[in-house]
Structure formats: structure tokens, C-alpha cells
Image: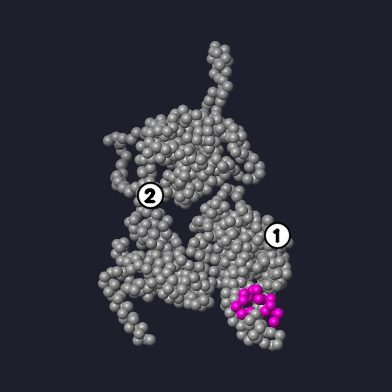
């Protein structure tokens, strides 16, 4: 691990598929590596089925929490901003970690687009939109589908841009998980995801596989970043976050905590039409129900000042 | 309200004029707004990049009345999927927050007001911000003695460096963002100014003999060559020469600074230690064969082998040091204590961008030859970029200098204090040798036939060891050298002894 912390361009592949571990690893590397100017660290990771919401988003708006629970899909919040993404082993995560000054989101996406376009000529034609999304144009039905989602985090000492690449994801789970039943019941200033139609690369090139794609990406990365190479046959290192539990523990605990998942949600109001046609409005701040409008005495006592996420199911029963 | 504001403006204007008179502007930062006598500064939202003009405030980490220091977190903002943490530029007390959460803030406009902790003579910590056009009357401070150009962007550290080197920032071409002048720009300008060639890669002169290849940088080590070859005599121009002599160029003076200065200090100190030098020749034929074989094997697997002789030599030194630990020791300045060091942190002299440096590979005793090769490459690359860390430089216990990569045979290396031994490796060249098992009996019988024994050609490397004669005796050095020799001449021995 100390080896990595010295900095320099490198490719690291995480062997963990736990979303909390991987997010913790990303943050740990960002904060502890001595980032060298003009060098890039590429981290590749995949998660078991999970939903990852942006730092300032509302999980109730972005995802169907009951569906997640029923299908063993984890809920997590990342440190960077932006919208919500669905992850599984068919969705590759790429993080490009650099110094603050070398942050260049567009360049990273252009690298990905050119790599894939060059390696799968005649299969895909990808291009980048103004909003920095990568779109696949279907030549048959002339539709445009999103295949990546981007987000970044910038601080004084580092900047990272991470994005996903839909290779072979279960689109059914994706659609169902992201379809919240509450999105009309909630009003807030939280970042809202902009929904788009998505597709997977494997729908257009059935032979595309994670392992070969990794090699293609690695080779293309080194071609672009010739500067510091660790021996001519070096492609990437595997890192097992399990070996660094101690160092990652504080981040993992935070990412898993109810505090970070629910309580940091920006303040919002949750309106529900109760059985006797009353419209009850809950105001939640820092995860706590601070105010309830239009409720009767019992309901008020039951819900006032309680954690919203604990009371959620009961509220839905009203 | 309007009247009150204009009154305040009048008061400020008066104070401004006072300051102008007394020239109490803050020093070289021409880009900032004038600071009023009460020292409240608006901290503006710096350019985030990507052409972003406005962001949304998502979280405040400070409130009015909080004391903040430089680099403390002020707030988190979000712009189109990027979540940015804004850190403070000054030390002081928060006086005002300009926005609430979820409000939009514009780049170049104030985020908070800070009252600076020190009085007006403090130099503000400065990272380049958006140009502020509202500060008129830009009368510069004369602290640097240069005429100001409002466009020059540079951090205080860079400005100080330029000042030390007596360079005007106006002459330096900035290569940072917004043409910001970086430290490298000033240093490069300094080199070109003084006429120094930039220390780039100098490849070892190609020879027909096999050298110990150091991939990028041949070292210019701390050795003094023994006068085996006569120094070139100065050619005297005869008075009858018809060659037109060019007018003599001027003498060039150069202050010794930086790494050179450190070299002066350490060499002077090292010179107080009584050195002795012991030289020998090692037969590297087996090692040459081994390397050829390894290279072929790798080629078969379609990989290329990046392995010079140095990793083998370094590992062999470590194995030999296990039996002669006194050579892997430190002595204190007064030579009262010897510390036998447990780790074999073997230093390798290299010629880097900054000059002669001896970074070391840590714990060679625990590393495989492949590990050593990787570490060596890393150190060379970082050295080449001038990015060796303190950790790389400190803690060395034994040093090697591969002068042979450039050329030469024997040398008298100078110790790296507080170590007690150092080796200089000459070049590996083919030399004729008598065969190993020369039978004495056969030579006598062949006397009358006047035949000579068959001559073999072997790859020989000359090596010169220097040691601290106060604590190391010749016999120890000689025995160590023999041990090392046996490892290098019989690489198999290295394999069976490696843990």
C-alpha cells in the first residue's frame, strides 16, 4: 500500500465488490496519496448490486427503498455530487484521481470514448454531450442512450472524476430500483437526477467482456500517459481492500452509517394523502421529523421528532 | 440607508488616501483589492475550472464569528455534478456569510468576509483569483524593487524564490493555469539565465564492451579518478600559428547554491575521515550469461526484461553484508559509537536533475532482485524529475556508485557520512585471462615447444571500495569484497542463500 501512496501514474483494480469498501478505498487513496503533477491514478472497481446516490441527494426521491430491500440491493451515498446510479458486476466504475490542477473531466471522457470507438469499430459510435454524458447512438432505431454517468469531487489537494460504464448490467433491476414511488411526494432542494434512457454495451456487441475490456482500457491508458511507467509489461495492480481494513475503517463506517445515508439528506417535506383524504405534510431536517402539518394528535405524538427513515414504513401505512 | 453608505464610502476613501500616503499597501499582491484599515477582506470564490461561472452552496463549515486558518474548509459547493470543497485562503475571523444553503454563488464574487488576524503588514496568503477591477490606484509596493505588472500570477513561495534568485517575474514565462508562474518556471529561467545546460538525460557513451546499463541516468558520483591516464596537457598555441584566435569570452561567475552547496558541505566533512581504498576485479561472465538467458526466457513469454546488473550487485552486497555487518553501520560525528544498522538500505548514486544525489533502496535484505529492479527504476525516474522524497534520501547504510556506466575502471570514492563503506563499480569489459584451471605440470612439459596456454576472454568489472579506516580494517574490507566476488562470480550461490 505504501508503494501506491508515493504517487505517480498507476492503474489499480479493486478486488472487492462491496460498495462501501470501494468508496472508502477511493477516498482513502485520494486523501493519502502524494499526488504528482501530470500523473493520473486510474482506479477500476465493480460493485455487487447497489444504488449509489450523490452527496446532496434524497434517497427517497431517487430510489425505491422497498425494492432495494427486497432484492438485497445496497443503498449508499458517495462523496461526490451529481445523480444516482445503479451498480452491479456488469457496470464498471472508473475513477481518475489527480492533483486539483490536473482535473479535466472532458479529457477523461474523451479518452474512454476514443478507446472504445477504436477497439470496437463498427460496433459502437459513442460521443460526448454538452453535459459531459457519453451517449451511444443506435444506428437502427436512431435512438440515443446514455451509457455512463459522471461525478466529481474537488478539494484543495486532489480532484477525482469517477464515471460508470454500463457493460452488461441488469437493466430491469436498474429501472425498478431507480423508480421511486415517492418522487412526487417529496419537495426539496436536493440534487435531482435527470433521467435518461440507458443501454449496455453488450446489447450491441455481445462478446464484450469485463476482462478483455480492462486490458484494452489499461493499454490505452498507458499509451496516453507514457510518462511514468513501471516497467514495460506493467498494466495494472490488484488491490485487496480487506488487507487495509484499519486504514479504511473510518470511511467504511461513515458510509454505512444511517447518519450518512439518511440524516445528511438536505431538508425536505414529505406529503402523504391519508386514508380520510387528509394531506399530511412532514418536514424533515437532518433526518428528524421537525414538523407535521394536518395530523391528528395520535399521529403527531407518534411521529414528531422521530427519525424519518425509521418511521418511513409506518408513515406509508397512513 | 443610501446616505449611510455614502458616508461610509467617504470614510473609507479618506483612509485609503492615508494608506496611499504612508505606502502601507500589502506587498507584492497587485491583484487583490485594497485592504481597509480595519482589515476585513472579502474572500472570493476562485475559478473552479471547466468554464463554470456559478455554483450552488450546499453546506457551510463555518459561521459568523468562527476563527479560521488557511486551508480550513469553508463550504461545499456543487456545480453540474462536481462537488467542490472550498478552503480558506487567510487566517482570521469570519465576519459575514454572503449566501445561504442552496443559493447560487458566482465565481469571482465574495463568499465570506474575513477579518484578518494580523495587522496590515501581513502578506496575504495568495493563490491566484479572478482579476478584481475595482481596485484603482494600483501603486505598487517597492519591496521587490520591480515595476509591477498586474497580470503576473504567482504564489508567495514562488515570488520569494524569484526574489532569492534575483529574477524579475516579468521576465519569466508562466506555464501554470492562467499563465501562472510556477516554481519550475523560475528555476528553468534561472538555469538559462546563468547559461547552465539543463541537466537532462546524458546517455552513456556507446562502447563495444558490455556495460552495467543504468536505464536512464548514469551517475556522476563523488569519486576522484586515480591518475592512471595522464591528464590532457594544455595545448600551447605557437606564435607562428595562422589560426585566427577568437576574442576570449568573459569569465563566468556562478554562486554555488542548491545541491552543489550541499555537496560542498558534505564532501568537506567527509574529507576529515581517514579513507582507505581497496580495489579488485570481479569476473562477471557467469552473470552476463545468466542475464542473457533470462532475457531470452522473457522474450519467449513475449515480455521484455528490464533488468540491469545493478539489482544483482545490490542484492549480492546485501547478502555479503549479512556476514560483515560492520560495513553496514553508522558512526557518530565524534566516532565514539558504532551503530550496526539492521536494515540494508543501499544507496545508489545518481545524476539527477538537481545534481548528485544518493537515494537508497530500503531493506534490500527483504527484497527479491526483481523488487530491487523496480525500486531502482522508481528512484531513477523520480530523481530524473526532481521528485525524490526525504524518505528516499534518508536512512542509507551502504552506498554504491556505478561510474562504470559512463566509463572508467578504478576510482577513490568518498564516503557518504555517516556510513562507513562505499563502492565504485567500474565498467564491465572483456579482458583476456588465463584459464581457471591452469595446470602447472603441463606448462613445464611444454617449455621446449614454446607454446602458451590458451587465453580466455572474460567479462571483468573493476571495483574500488573505500572505507572509514577508523573503524574498518583492510582485512575486513578484503574479506567482504571476496565474499561479494564469490556471489557475483557464482550467481547460484546467491540463489541458495537468499531468504
Residue B37 tag number:
none
Marks 1, 2: nearer the viewer: 2
Residue at x 44%, y 60% (from the top left corner): B175
Does the magenta portion include A270? no
In this picture, which residue range is highlighted in magenta? A303-318
**Residue B326 shown left or right of residue A307 in the figure:** left
From the viewer's side, name the closer residue of A310 and A124: A310
From the viewer's side, name the closer residue of B201 and B466: B466
From the viewer's side, name the closer residue of B394 and A256: A256
What chain is tagged by disc 1? A
Residue furthest bottom as drawn: A277
Characterize the magenta stretch by its predominant secondary structure: helix
**Residue A45 shown left or right of residue B95 in the figure:** right
The coloring applied to the image is one colour
Please name the residue that numbered disc 1 is placed on: A208
> Element type at marker 2?
loop
Q: Mark 1 vs mark 2: tell me if same chain.
A: no
> Residue B105's x, y, as percent?
48, 75
> Residue B247's x, y, as percent?
29, 45
Image quadrant where one finds the N terminus of chain B: bottom left
Q: Quadrant of residue A257?
A: bottom right
Residue at x 54%, y 54% (from the top left corner): A5
Q: Quadrant of residue B69?
A: bottom left
Does the magenta portion include A312? yes
Instruction: Look at the picture and state if A71 lies above or below B299.
Output: below
What chain is tagged by disc 2? B
Instruction: Look at the picture and state if A291 lies above or below A148.
Output: below
Instruction: Look at the picture and state if A20 lies above or below A8.
Output: below
Image quadrant where one finds the C terminus of chain B: top right
Please name the residue that numbered disc 2 is placed on: B258
Amino acid at each position: 500500500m505504501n508503494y501506491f501512496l508515493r504517487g505517480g501514474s498507476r492503474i489499480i483494480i479493486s478486488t472487492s465488490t462491496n460498495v462501501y469498501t470501494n468508496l472508502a478505498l477511493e477516498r482513502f487513496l485520494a486523501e493519502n496519496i502524494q499526488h504528482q503533477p501530470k500523473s493520473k491514478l486510474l482506479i477500476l472497481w465493480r460493485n455487487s448490486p447497489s444504488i449509489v446516490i450523490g452527496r446532496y441527494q434524497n434517497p427517497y426521491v431517487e430510489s425505491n427503498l422497498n425494492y432495494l430491500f427486497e432484492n438485497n440491493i445496497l443503498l449508499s451515498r458517495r462523496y461526490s455530487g451529481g445523480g444516482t446510479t445503479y451498480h452491479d458486476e456488469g457496470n464498471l466504475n472508473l475513477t481518475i484521481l489527480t492533483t486539483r490542477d490536473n482535473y479535466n473531466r472532458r479529457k477523461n471522457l474523451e479518452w474512454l470514448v476514443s478507446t472504445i470507438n477504436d477497439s470496437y469499430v463498427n460496433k459502437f459510435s459513442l460521443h460526448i454531450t454538452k453535459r459531459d454524458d457519453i451517449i451511444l447512438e443506435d444506428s437502427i432505431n436512431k435512438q440515443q442512450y446514455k451509457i455512463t454517468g459522471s461525478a466529481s469531487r474537488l478539494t484543495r489537494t486532489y480532484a477525482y472524476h469517477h464515471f460508470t460504464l454500463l457493460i452488461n448490467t441488469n437493466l430491469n433491476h436498474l429501472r425498478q430500483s431507480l423508480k421511486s414511488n415517492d418522487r412526487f411526494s417529496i419537495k426539496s432542494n436536493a440534487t435531482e437526477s435527470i433521467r435518461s434512457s440507458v443501454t449496455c454495451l453488450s446489447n450491441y456487441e455481445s462478446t464484450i467482456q469485463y476482462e478483455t475490456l480492462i486490458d484494452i482500457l489499461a493499454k490505452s491508458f498507458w499509451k496516453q500517459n507514457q510518462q511514468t511507467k513501471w516497467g514495460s509489461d506493467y498494466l495494472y495492480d490488484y488491490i485487496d481492500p480487506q488487507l487495509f481494513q484499519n486504514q479504511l475503517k473510518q470511511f467504511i463506517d461513515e458510509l454505512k452509517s444511517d447518519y450518512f445515508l439518511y440524516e445528511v439528506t438536505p431538508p425536505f417535506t414529505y406529503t402523504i394523502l391519508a386514508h380520510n383524504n387528509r394531506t399530511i405534510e412532514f418536514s424533515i431536517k437532518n433526518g428528524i421529523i421537525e414538523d407535521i402539518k394536518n395530523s391528528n394528535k395520535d399521529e403527531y405524538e407518534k411521529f414528531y421528532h422521530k427519525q424519518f427513515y425509521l418511521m418511513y414504513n409506518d408513515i406509508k401505512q397512513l | 440607508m443610501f446616505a449611510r453608505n455614502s458616508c461610509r464610502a467617504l470614510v473609507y476613501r479618506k483612509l485609503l488616501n492615508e494608506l496611499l500616503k504612508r505606502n502601507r499597501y500589502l506587498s507584492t499582491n497587485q491583484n487583490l483589492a485594497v485592504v481597509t484599515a480595519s482589515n476585513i477582506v472579502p474572500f472570493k470564490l476562485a475559478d473552479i475550472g471547466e468554464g463554470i461561472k456559478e455554483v450552488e452552496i450546499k453546506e457551510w463549515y463555518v459561521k459568523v464569528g468562527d476563527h479560521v486558518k488557511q486551508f480550513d474548509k469553508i463550504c461545499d459547493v456543487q456545480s453540474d455534478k462536481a462537488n467542490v470543497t472550498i478552503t480558506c485562503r487567510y487566517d482570521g475571523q469570519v465576519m459575514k456569510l454572503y449566501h445561504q444553503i442552496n443559493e447560487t454563488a458566482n465565481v469571482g464574487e465574495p463568499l465570506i468576509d474575513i477579518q484578518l488576524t494580523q495587522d496590515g503588514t501581513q502578506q496575504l496568503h495568495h493563490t491566484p483569483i479572478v482579476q478584481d477591477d475595482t481596485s484603482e490606484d494600483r501603486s505598487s509596493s517597492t519591496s521587490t524593487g520591480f515595476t509591477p505588472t498586474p497580470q503576473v500570477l504567482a504564489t508567495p513561495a514562488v515570488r520569494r524564490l524569484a526574489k532569492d534568485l534575483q529574477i524579475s517575474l516579468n521576465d519569466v514565462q508562466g506555464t501554470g493555469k492562467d499563465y501562472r508562474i510556477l516554481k519550475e518556471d523560475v528555476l528553468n529561467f534561472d538555469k538559462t539565465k546563468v547559461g547552465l545546460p539543463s541537466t537532462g538525460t546524458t546517455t552513456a557513451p556507446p562502447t563495444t564492451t558490455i556495460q552495467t546499463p543504468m536505464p536512464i541516468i548514469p551517475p556522476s558520483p563523488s569519486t576522484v579518478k586515480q591518475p592512471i591516464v595522464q591528464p590532457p596537457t594544455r595545448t600551447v598555441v605557437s606564435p607562428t600559428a595562422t589560426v585566427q584566435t577568437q576574442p576570449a569570452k568573459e569569465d563566468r561567475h556562478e554562486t554555488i547554491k542548491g545541491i552543489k552547496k550541499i555537496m560542498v558541505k558534505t564532501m568537506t566533512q567527509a574529507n576529515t575521515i581517514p579513507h582507505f581504498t581497496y580495489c579488485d576485479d570481479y569476473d562477471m561472465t557467469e552473470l552476463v550469461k545468466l542475464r542473457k538467458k533470462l532475457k531470452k526466457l522473457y522474450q519467449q513469454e513475449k515480455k521484455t526484461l528490464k533488468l540491469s546488473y545493478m539489482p544483482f550487485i545490490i542484492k549480492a552486497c546485501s547478502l555479503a553484508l549479512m556476514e560483515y555487518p560492520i560495513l553496514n553501520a553508522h558512526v557518530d560525528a565524534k566516532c565514539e559509537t558504532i551503530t550496526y544498522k539492521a536494515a540494508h538500505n543501499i544507496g545508489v548514486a545518481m545524476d539527477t536533475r538537481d545534481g548528485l544525489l544518493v537515494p537508497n533502496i530500503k531493506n534490500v535484505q527483504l527484497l527479491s532482485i526483481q523488487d530491487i529492479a523496480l525500486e531502482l527504476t522508481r528512484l531513477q525516474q523520480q530523481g530524473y524529475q526532481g521528485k525524490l522524497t526525504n524518505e528516499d534520501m534518508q536512512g542509507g547504510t551502504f552506498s554504491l556508485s556505478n561510474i562504470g556506466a559512463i566509463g572508467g575502471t578504478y576510482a577513490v570514492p568518498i564516503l557518504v557520512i555517516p556510513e562507513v563503506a562505499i563502492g565504485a563499480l567500474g565498467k564491465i569489459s572483456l579482458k583476456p585471462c588465463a584459464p581457471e584451471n591452469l595446470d602447472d605440470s603441463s606448462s613445464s612439459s611444454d617449455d621446449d615447444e614454446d607454446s602458451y596456454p590458451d587465453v580466455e576472454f572474460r567479462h571483468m568489472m573493476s571495483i574500488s571500495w573505500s572505507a572509514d579506516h577508523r573503524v574498518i580494517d583492510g582485512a575486513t574490507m578484503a574479506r567482504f569484497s571476496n565474499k561479494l566476488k564469490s556471489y557475483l562470480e557464482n550467481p547460484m550461490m546467491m540463489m541458495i542463500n537468499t531468504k
